[in-house]
Image (cartoon, rainbow, N blue to C red):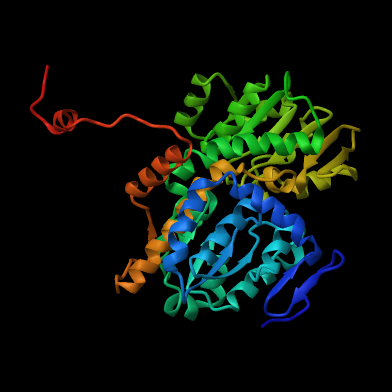
Amino acid sequence: MGNYPPKKSQGFFSEVEGKYCVRDISLAEEGRLLIDWAESRMPVLMALRKKFAETKPFKGYTIAGCLHVTKETAVLIRTFAAAGANVTWSGCNPLSTNDAVAAALADEGISIYAWYGNHPDFYWCIERTIDHNPHLTLDDGCDLINTVHESYETMAKNQIIGGTEETTTGVQRLRARQKAGKLFYPVFAVNDTETKWDFDNVYGTGQSTIDGIIRATSVLIAGQNFVVAGHGHCGSGVAKRAKGLGANTICTEVKATAALKAILEGHEVMSMHEAAKVGDIFVTATGVKDVIRKWHFENMKDGAIVCNTGHYDAEINIPELEELSVSKRTIRPNCEEYTLKDGRRIFLLAQGRLINLAAAEGHPSEVMDMSFANQFMAHLRLVEAHKNGEKLPCEVLDLPQEQDEFIAKTKLEMLGISIDQLTEEQIAYINNYNAGT
């Protein structure tokens, strides 16, 4: 095990070398209450837990996870453990760990290395999960998979049987790695499943981003010029929720079809150069660096609020904002006031990190229920292939549509909602290529 203690520059810690390192183990009971609440809102994952707790398909397998340590993630971790897995975990963002949840998981025997604000020790935490010699990896943003591939190549090639990726940014990086011939084990793109992509990304990001902005600022959304950079699944969800609260929504895009969709959904579309001059609140949701940079800061209104809901903090060029500023102060939690040379103030939220997780609680449990059901079932697929001697290609793999249908139908059943079924005649009609007018 490696180099205890870590830098840990922010106060008291609870740790057992080789087992866990969290902020404060005495927060465990508070964390258990949060997890219990999430479990009451995640019926699909709880049904999977009940089903596989008896057969324990993951017995003998170690899963290393690198994903936001929230109450919802804890439900997934508990489900893996109930199904027989040895689980080790780290956070996938320095500001997205709930310390009470981390303490509860550590107290329940999970080898977890995570605390809020672990900037200097972020990769140290990931490496501690790798110390447990995992057979499977579960990632959000590709930091764990990249670390394994770059620093533990033998393990990646010979021991790890497969993994999953939760988010758009991570899938993009994995496809680039595959294209370069540098992906050494199969990875399922959980992000690309319909019951993740069209629900978590749209409805989860939309609500939780607005939640984070309001918690960090208490600002009134109605009447504000609300600029969303990117009108993909995440950005469209944010714009929709902001518009519903009465904002004047403006979208910026580089993709023509996405821009057209934004217009037809009732948003104004313009370039960021134009939007910088009129925006009151800015949210980046692109997965690309330097979306808001020096020129934009120089042309923003006094009092403009800037934040990010993409996975990494590179979308806002914070070093350039620092260069333009003569002073900086934390004016309220997760809200920093930068004063420029001409006296204008720009408010940066959550240090440019994920606003919905750094300043709020992340996505609602109800949508994470489906996303994490996909994670569980994808890992089940990897283990079944391994047990059956099936060799999956070292590629970024799609999950079958049947899995989406199963999860969606299970969710509807748990909600007590019924839907129509095609009759045999209707199925025959659909499959009859000679049917005409």
In the displayed structure image, the side of residue 55 where residue 346 appears, left or right: right
Q: Residue at x 57, y 61 (%)?
A: 77
Q: Quadrant of residue 202?
A: top right
Q: Quadrant of the N terminus?
A: bottom right
* Residue nearest the observer in this picture, 266 or 195: 195
| Residue 371 visible to an observer of this rendering | yes
In the displayed structure image, the side of residue 332 where residue 65 appears, left or right: left
* Residue nearest the observer in this picture, 382 or 397: 382
Q: Residue at x 48, y 25 (%)?
A: 261
- Depicted 156 relative to depicted 286: above or below: below
Q: Quadrant of the C terminus?
A: top left
- Residue 72 percent across, percent down from the top left: 61, 51
- Residue 388 percent across, percent down from the top left: 30, 72
- Residue 12 percent across, percent down from the top left: 86, 67
| Residue 295 visible to an observer of this rendering | no
- Residue 239 percent across, percent down from the top left: 60, 28
In the displayed structure image, the side of residue 339 where residue 372 appears, left or right: left
* Residue nearest the observer in this picture, 53 or 437: 53
Q: Residue at x 75, y 27 (%)?
A: 280
